[in-house]
Image: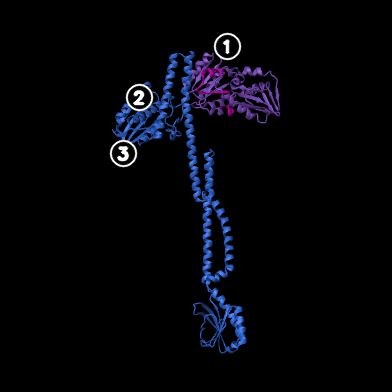
Amino acid sequence: MSEQPLVLVVDDEPHITELVGLYLKRAGYRVHAVGDGAAALQAAASLHPDALVLDIMLPKLDGLEVCRRLRAAGDPVPVLMLTARDDDYDKILGLELGADDYLTKPFNPRELVARVKALLRRRDRFNATATAHPLHLGNTLIDPAAREVRVDGKTVPLRAQEFELLWVLAQHRGMVLTREQLLRLAWGYDYVGQTRTVDVHVAQLRRKLTGSDLRIETVVGVGYKLVF
Amino acid sequence: MLRSLRSRLLLSYVAVIAVVVVTAATSAALFLLHSPLIEQRQFIRMDLVARVMRRQVPAVQVALSPLRWAEVTTSASELGVRVIVTDGHGQVLGDTASQAPPLLPPRKSEGKPFRGRLRDAEGQTWLYTARRISGGLLVITTPMPSRWQWLLRHSGDWLLPMVEAGLLAFGLALLLAWWLSRWIARPLRQVAAAAHDFAQGRYAPLPEEGPAEARTLARAFNQMARQLEASQKSQRAFIANVSHELKTPLTSILGFAQALADGTAPPAQAAGIIRSEAERMQRLVMDLLDLARLDAGTAHLQQVPVDLVPLLRAVLTRFQPRAAQRQQTLHLEAAATPTVWGDPDRLLQIFGNLLDNALTHTPRQGEVVLRVRSEGPWAVVEVEDQGPGIPPEALPHIFDRFYRGDRARTGREHVGLGLSIVRELVRAHHGQVTAHNRRGQGAIFVVKLPQR
């Protein structure tokens, strides 16, 4: 019998680890829960989980630090961060911590399961885009095989999720995509609740694509579209 | 125009300059009015005339010859003088202004030329200079001018340069005043600009330089700005903490409600968790309301005499079941039986929160001791635990809202408001609360309340 994916859940609130554990188990995952940052690093090293659900406010070592150390040690495990503060968004995604996604409390447990699923599926989806042909749009080259973006020949360092979002926008260029559509297409979510992550990623992309002919326009009340 | 300090300064300088110029002009005029210069000028002229005439008329006889006298009269009118010839004993022999009121020249038969003043019958004053000639005196006279008339007649000589100098000084002074007023008002304008920036949310400390008053102002402004910033920061932190502390139980409540609805969690478990998390939220909300009322001063505290020992016994009884759960023991050591003024419910809350904190930090089978004693005007209550103590860096913040040194150390139900409420309540009772570490292990909280 093939092993079920193992999800490491880190939160110092037992009721929340309990809740997350119940839903993940029902979705067919194995769950290991720990209550502080130091224990999380130990468990990640010894159990090799397939994904991490990591709260930010943790005793001993906070979630941001746990994530930073995991990435510094070269661990590519997908990380979904939990936060109770709105101003943590930028810390999670802006500082290039290496977290893959986040949810704000209070969250719907079904949405959490959907996001964990998407994180675990992501590698497969990346392999699917790898066979597509490169796109030349003005001075910008998007190469899905190399997962690389060049503006005037210069490589723009994009994180995996940012590349995925740009690829989806580029394939639907000129069309308006809603945040929900983007979450389904670029993130692979089958359950959509919080959409703020799209806005944060778009802001990052715009910043990184300065100098490119590509522009991501906001269509107020609808979503985003890529024009060039 | 007088709205700004600068224009007021400028105007005051202008006023000072105007006063100085007017004073200078007045004193110059007064000086001229009283100076002997006017008369001296007159005498010098008359002496000159006298010297020339004496050569023309060396003797009384010569002067009085009709032909010569006509010459003398002509010269006198041309030179603007009146010439009188006397015999040296007071007898007037000839007068070029015969129509004018008669003048009685001085009598003097010998000596050098002499001068002086005379008054005619109409009261007009005359200046004269007299010289001896053969057979009598040659007297040259001119009416003594009124000083005012003289000043006015010669105003062109002195008034114009005075006005010119005044205007020049005024112009220079205005320039100086404009620069000075700018210089003096600059620190004020800087403070105003900084205050404006601060109101817009941009804060840059003011340089503490310039005159002493400006430095004081800048220092006070910087201090105020820093305090305001710190208070804004703590306000933001407070709101972030409140939102965090409310969202955490809310996550469990919403999550387990969902789990209850879709059958993911057993109903009894979900209901129990929802209830305990809702209670936690309720406690937090009550604590926040308490703090808000204490901050606003609208917490109405009773003022009745309260015997501390029975009150503390009641607190102990209330916490006994909780202590028993972890085999902890509670002790009360009463060295005195003080009475204080206060609100019994609030005093119960103070010692309840301290006891809650002590039990949370004391390990299983540990002991928490309450001590009461009297110390001068104070009733002193100590709450002593056997926990790990308070880290030195946490001591100054232990009563701050939502402060928790290490979250691993505190129980999860502890949201960090209990000790803040204790501090505010003790303050409202005009007392003090402090925290220390015991030498061996554990912390000790000391509450001092004024005795009745």
Give the quadrant of the C terminus of chain B.
Answer: top left
For the point 61% across and 84% down, which residue is it? B70
Q: Colour of chain B?
A: blue
Q: Chain of mark 1?
A: A
Q: Nearer the viewer, mark 3 or mark 1?
A: 3
* Position in image of residue B343 (x %, y %): 33, 32
Categorize mark 2 by other alpha carbons within 10 Å: few (<14), some (14-19), many (20+). some
The quadrant holding residue B331 is: top left
Element at label 3: loop
Chain letter for the purple colouring in the rendering: A
The quadrant holding residue A135 is: top right
Q: How is the image coloured?
A: by chain
Pick whichever, A115 or B15, lies toward us: B15
3D distance between C-alphas at marks 2 and 3? 29 Å
Pick whichever, A183 or A119, lies toward us: A183
Circle 2: residue type:
Phe
Read off the magenta span.
A92-116
Element at label 1: loop
Q: Which mark is residue B319?
A: 2
Q: Chain of mark 3?
A: B
Are labels 2 and 3 on one chain? yes
Q: Which residue is mark 1?
A: A2
Q: Which mark is residue B377?
A: 3
Categorize mark 3 by other alpha carbons within 10 Å: few (<14), some (14-19), many (20+). few
3D distance between C-alphas at marks 3 and 1? 76 Å
Circle 3: residue type:
Pro
